[in-house]
Image: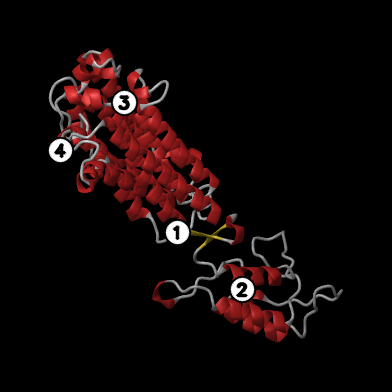
Amino acid sequence: MSRGGPAAPAPVRLRAAVRMSRPDQVLLVLAVYAVGWVAGTAGVRTGGVALPPAGAALTALVVVAVATSVHVVNEFADVETDARTVRTRFSGGSGALREHGLPAAFALRVAVVAAALAAVLTALGLVTGIVSGLVAALLVLGLVGGWGYSVGPWPFSRHGWGEVANALLGGLLLPATGAVVAGAALGPAALTFLPFALLTFVNLLETQWADRDADRAAGKHTLATRLRAPALRRLGAVAGVAAYGLSLVVHPWPVALAGLLAAPLSALGVHRLGHGRPGPSVAAMVAFVLLQGAAWWSSAEPGGPFVDMAEGRQLVPRCLPSADALRQMSTLMRHLPHATEGRQLVPRCLPSADALRQMSTLMRHLPHATEGRQLVPRCLPFADALRQMSKYSSNSCGCGRRRVGWISLARL
């Protein structure tokens, strides 16, 4: 029996499991998830409800478990292919099974454990209410789709759809999940990261080319084994141009321009498709998402420009009072019928002195802007004006009376 066989020491098995999980790629997965979250916080927060911080953290743990499981099950499925190819930093697997003499079944066991951990954490999030049903469904889709890429009755990677499936899972579903966690609607989030998915597709064309001979010998069909180098270059060029062009359409200008900085790397990667080791397209994909993530971050306010009211249905600008203060003010304002003819909102009859004093107290609690000035909605009277108006309340009628008392706006 080899030194690293089924009875290999626990430290050896642990090192092999960590290497098969591809820690550098797991970190990249977390970075893409974080970029999705930042984008959802900064600019795609339409129609969704953000998870609490505990839910976002738990989702990140599930993402790590899913990525680990998907990477390791791919080592199990490609053990024959990886043994025939020349391993590079971005292709050919980790080499951990071969180096430690471990059987392929060991990789399958590690993948199952990681998948079970992801399922348990997702169920825990659902039971405690810190993870929404939509986020849980996206996580399950990522796990099932990742396994379907490598194993199953019809593995995507062996039937010519591996590059497309991988780009959709890692380039679209992953960051869109981060955006949904931050409160974005799924549709806008998916559209936001379609350019990144296209660049991920170009990256996969480059990395699969390095394994084309071993894949062909193992009966594994990929686009690199089916298409010649010139056709791959044309396909990569179309996808790259579409990615940067679509970014200019769907992203804010600062974000789109930040992504354009990665265009030279993409051009170099497409030019080298079919000859040379993989690298430029991988670097372009990473640079694109990180540069755009930095642009999203720079444009985001802490916690986003809006805060959710109770039940999370309405978005209220942060310059307004708290939800409790708004509800109290809303109660008071229901007693102020507004005129509809003019441009200014003028109460038809003044509230009682007590109501005015309560409103004045609320107005003093409005959040302060720079230089200590108070931010007051233009449709409401100022606190000083309210205090002056309270002097006239005894001379004006109350709501429901027939007499109407008038106040000159110039005196306020």
Label 3 vs 1, first from the N-terminus: 1
Circle 1 or circle 2, nearest the eye: 1
Residue that carries the numbered disc 4 in the rendered image: 3
The tag earlier along the polypeptide, 1 or 2, is 1
Q: Nearer the viewer, residue 191 or 88?
A: 88
- The structure's colour scheme is secondary structure
Q: Position of residue 291 (x, y in %)?
A: 27, 45
User: Whole-percent x and y of residue 180?
Assistant: 47, 46
Toward which corner of the image does residue 84 lie, by quadrant?
top left
Task: Judge by depth and name the residue closer to the eye, 274 or 338.
Answer: 274
Give the structural element (helix, strand or loop) at label 4.
loop
Q: Residue furthest right?
A: 402
What amino acid does circle 2 point to?
Pro
Q: Is residue 191 visible?
A: no
Judge by depth and name the residue closer to the eye, 146 or 173: 146
Image height of 67 relative to 236, above or below:
below
Residue type (three-letter) at the residue carrying disc 1: Ala
Residue in view at x 40 percent, y 28 percent:
148
Q: Which residue in the protein does label 3 denote?
A: 239
Kind of element beneath mark 1: helix
Element on which disc 3 rests: helix
Q: Earlier in the sequence, mark 4 or mark 2?
A: 4
